[in-house]
Every structure is written in structure tokens, then in C-alpha cells.
């Protein structure tokens, strides 16, 4: 079950070269459970055929002034009334201008004018068109309406061969914006601090000690908290993941660096989700020059890294503290021990020796352990696990306040 289950989305496509990238967006929306009605302008249909959108969404795509819907008794008014959201990607300067002036000369602009739901606009155009004072003025007028949400454009190479602002935002980012707009904002006004990924402890200028954490669980928590309206700060060790949309990212390398960053941001936060796999050991002495392999029989001397959560727990901060315990074997007894030892409110524990709950996989099987209870969740995607953890956090925050 996706987050967009039971949502009905009108996907507007206007005549920009980026229209071919909207096919990917259509696929993502459908895969996440949404019902999608593609509405193309005449110019868009010259870029990508309606048959492609029909195949991707399972519904006949509308073109220009429409026809299929009217024939089946659903006028543009019904379409806009049924829609939970309208997303227009790419949105050309021409369509933005028309919407900003309340014009309704095709099915898409008519649907927007008769709608009351949020409208996501992902502009795509030449940089000079984007910077033109007329376009600026149109955008200003559009953004006076709270329900008009601009996503992008990105800066990059444009279809016309030029470089600059005007490139349609990545389909993944538009998809995330759609899910954010349609999520319940039960963390609005809250500041969530998340740590994620591994840390790297240097041996010499070219080598380090680290672990197999991918950062996926922590990044899923960040995305979920952003969707729910929280202000999110992510303290991230090195990962191969794209910076999550809508969060402030503080990159760190070592456990000591992570400790500094977490302690710095702690005072302002309502929840700390310590999902990072902090390296437990660092070198007593880091070699200043590359260690040569001719140094036969090399041995290294280690010392423990600062235990960040332990330190945080000792400070008895006002915020909720959530720790993670990656164990091999039954994780519950260890989770209970860590809960007490580090003075935590909740521990999310898993057995990383299971093939579907370990490092670098997209699923997880976790236990939520607090002072009273141990709840085992079924096998879920890391995204769903993040939602369930935040459901619990929201309840705990409400209790704390009450
Ligand atoms: N943690 C931390 N600082 C460390 C090590 C761990 O803040 N130096 C945090 C982790 O981010 C996690 C929790 O403590 O939220 C538990 O981490 P884990 O590695 O499972 O436990 P440890 O306390 O390191 O104990 P052990 O390695 O013996 O299992």
C-alpha cells in the first residue's frame, strides 16, 4: 500500500521537451497507489503521445479541450472536484501565464480555474523566458494563492543547449512534493533531528574504518518527517544517497564530528532520531602519511568513540530520544538494556543477520521497544517502517505535552 492510495491526481502536461520525463512521474504516482488522469495540452501531445500516458495510468489521456471525459459524462468541473491535487509538469511559461490570468482555453486550464485543491507547478522553459519580468509577474500573481505550489525549476543544461535556471525538476523530487502536499501535517511546528549513515574513522590520509550502513533507514525517516510538516535537520555520515528534499543537511565524517553536530542542534529539537551507525572505535593515533605496505606486521591501536546518545541522555534534554539497535540474533533484550543505559524513550531494534532486515536492503523488520512494551512490526519497506516510527513519535509527543 502506497502513501498515495485512494488519491486522485490530475496530471497536466504542457508543451515542453521535458514532457518525456513526466512519463516517469506518471509511473511513480501510479505505483504509489494514486489514480491518475493525464490531461495534455495540444502542444504536449506533439511531444509525447497520449497513448503513452494511457498505458502508464490505465486511463485514456485527455488532449486539448478533452473529449473522452465529456463523452463519458464527466465534465471538467467533475474532474476538478474529484481531484485531490493537480500537478502540471512541465508547466510552460504560456500555461503559467494563462493560469495566472484566470484563463480557461483548454481542459487543463479550465480544470485549474474550477478547482479548489492544491496545484503543483513544475516550470520548464528557457532561462530568458524564466527571467523575463512578465513571467516573474505572472508567478508572483500565482503565488498569492496559497494552493499554488511551485516546484523548481532546477538549474542545469536546458533542451535548447543553454545552461541556467529553467530545467524541469527531477520527477523524483516532484513525486516527493506531491506526497508531501497530500500528507497529514501531524509534525507541523516540530523540529526533528535525524542522524543517519555510517561514520568513517581515518587510519591515515587514504584509509578509514567504517561499517556497512547505507543510511537508507535514516533518510526514509527524514523524508517522512518532512512530509508530515516537521522542520528537519539531518546529520549525515557519508552515504551514496541523494540529499533528501526539504531538509537541512549537515554532512559529517567521523563519530567526533557527528557528536559535535548532534549536540549543537539538540537544544532546538523536539525529537532526536539517532539512526546513524556510529563507528564504535577510532584510532588512537592517525598516521599523518600513507601507511606503506612494506611496514610488515602492522598493528593498530583503537579507542572507543564518544557515545553520542549516552552523552545526550545524560544531559536529560527536553526532547524525545529515539535510539536504534542493530543486533545479530534476538534484538529485544539488547534494546531494553540500551533503552535504560542511555535513558531513551524508544529503541527501534532489528536483527541485521536476517536477509530482509540488514544493511543496504530496502526492507526492515523491527521491534519498537519502550519502557512498557515491545511491539514487533511485520516485514515492511523502510519507508513504511519510517511512517510507523513517526506514528509512535507523534503519539509520544502528544502524551508528553498532555
Ligand atoms: N550510538 C551513538 N554513539 C556511538 C555508538 C552508538 O550515539 N558511539 C547510538 C546509535 O546511533 C544507536 C544507539 O546508540 O542509536 C545504539 O547503537 P549500537 O551500535 O546498537 O549500540 P552500542 O551502544 O554501540 O553498543 P554495542 O556496539 O555494544 O551493541
Image (cartoon, helix red, strand yellow):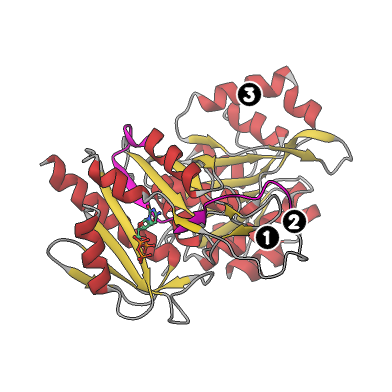
Is disc 2 placed on a helix, strand or loop?
helix
Q: Nearer the viewer, mark 1 or mark 3?
A: 1
User: Can you identify the residue that label 1 sits on?
Assistant: 23
As drawn, the label of residue 138 is: 3
State yes or no: discs 1 and 3 in contact (Cβ < 8 Å).
no
Residue 76 in view, yes or no: no
How far is mark 3 from mark 2, CA to CA?
25 Å
| Local SS, label 1 | helix
The quarter of the image that holds ligand 1 is bottom left
Q: Is residue 242 above or below residue 52?
A: above
Q: Point out the stretch of residues depicted in magenta.
A: 265-290
Query: Mark 3 falls on what kind of element?
Result: helix
The number of discs equals 3
Task: Judge from the rendering whether residue 162 lies leftward or rightward of residue 50; answer left or right.
Answer: right
The quadrant of the image that shows the N terminus is bottom left
The residue closer to the viewer here, 224 or 298, is 298
Residue drawn at x 71%, y 66% is: 52
Percent position of residue 298, x then y: 65, 66
Please give left or right for residue 164 compared with residue 82 in the image.
right
Q: Residue 202, how many percent across, how many down? A: 60, 52
- Closest to the observer, 385 or 272: 272
Asked if the residue under mark 2 is in contact with the one under mark 1, i.e. CB atoms within 8 Å, the reply is: yes
Front-most of 105 and 282? 282
Q: Residues within 10 Å of mark 2 (few under 14, many from 20)?
A: some
Pointer 2: what residue? 20
- Residue for point 42% across, 60% down: 3
Look at the numbered disc 3 and say if its residue's Cβ is closer than 8 Å to ligand 1: no
Q: Earlier in the sequence, mark 3 or mark 2?
A: 2
Q: Are marks 3 and 2 in contact (CB under 8 Å)?
A: no
Q: Which of the two marks, 3 or 2, is nearer to us in this view?
A: 2
Question: Going 63% across and 38% down the picture, which residue do you hit?
Answer: 152
Residue at coordinates 28% horizontally, 56% vertically from top-left? 391
Amino acid at each position: 500500500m502506497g502513501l498515495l492510495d485512494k488519491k486522485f491526481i490530475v496530471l497536466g502536461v504542457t508543451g515542453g521537451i521535458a514532457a518525456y520525463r513526466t512519463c516517469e512521474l506518471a509511473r511513480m504516482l501510479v505505483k504509489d497507489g494514486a489514480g491518475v488522469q493525464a490531461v495534455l495540452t495540444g502542444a504536449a501531445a506533439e511531444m509525447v503521445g497520449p497513448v503513452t500516458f494511457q498505458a502508464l495510468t490505465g486511463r485514456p489521456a485527455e488532449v486539448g479541450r478533452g473529449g473522452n471525459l465529456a463523452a463519458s459524462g464527466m465534465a471538467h468541473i467533475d474532474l476538478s472536484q474529484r481531484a485531490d491535487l493537480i500537478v502540471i509538469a512541465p508547466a510552460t511559461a504560456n500555461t503559467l501565464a494563462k493560469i495566472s490570468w484566470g484563463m480557461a482555453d483548454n481542459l487543463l486550464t479550465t480544470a485549474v480555474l474550477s478547482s479548489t485543491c492544491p496545484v503543483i507547478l513544475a516550470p520548464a522553459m528557457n532561462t530568458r523566458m524564466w527571467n523575463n519580468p512578465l513571467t516573474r509577474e505572472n508567478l508572483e500573481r500565482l503565488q498569492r494563492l496559497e494552493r499554488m505550489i511551485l516546484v523548481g525549476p532546477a538549474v542545469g543544461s536546458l533542451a535548447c543547449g543553454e545552461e541556467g535556471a529553467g530545467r524541469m525538476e527531477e520527477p523524483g523530487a516532484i513525486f516527493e512534493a506531491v506526497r508531501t502536499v497530500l500528507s497529514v501535517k501531524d509534525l507541523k511546528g516540530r523540529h526533528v533531528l535525524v542522524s543517519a549513515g555510517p561514520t568513517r574513522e581515518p587510519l591515515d590520509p587514504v584509509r578509514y574504518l567504517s561499517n556497512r550502513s547505507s543510511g537508507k533507514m535514516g533518510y526514509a525517516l527524514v523524508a517522512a518527517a518532512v512530509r508530515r510538516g516537521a522542520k528537519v535537520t539531518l546529520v549525515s555520515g557519508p552515504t551514496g544517497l541523494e540529499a533528501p528534499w526539504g531538509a537541512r543537511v549537515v554532512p559529517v565524517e567521523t563519530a567526533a564530528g557527528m557528536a559535535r553536530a548532534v549536540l549543537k542542534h539538540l537544544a532546538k529539537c523536539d525529537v532526536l532520531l539517532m539512526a546513524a551507525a556510529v563507528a564504535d572505535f577510532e584510532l588512537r593515533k592517525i598516521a599523518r602519511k600513507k601507511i606503506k605496505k612494506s611496514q610488515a606486521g602492522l598493528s593498530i591501536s583503537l579507542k572507543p568513540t564518544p557515545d553520542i546518545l549516552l552523552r545526550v541522555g545524560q544531559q536529560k534534554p527536553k526532547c524525545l530520544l529515539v535510539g536504534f539497535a542493530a543486533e545479530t540474533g534476538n534484538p529485544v533484550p539488547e534494546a531494553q538494556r540500551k533503552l535504560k543505559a542511555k535513558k531513551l524513550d524508544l529503541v527501534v531494534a532489528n536483527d541485521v543477520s536476517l536477509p530482509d532486515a540488514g544493511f543496504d536492503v530496502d526492507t526492515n523488520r523491527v521491534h519498537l521497544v519502550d519502557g512498557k512494551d515491545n511491539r514487533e512490526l511485520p516485514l515492511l519497506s523502510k519507508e513504511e517502517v519510517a511512517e510507523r516510527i513517526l506514528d509512535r513519535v507523534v503519539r509520544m509527543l502528544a502524551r508528553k505535552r498532555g
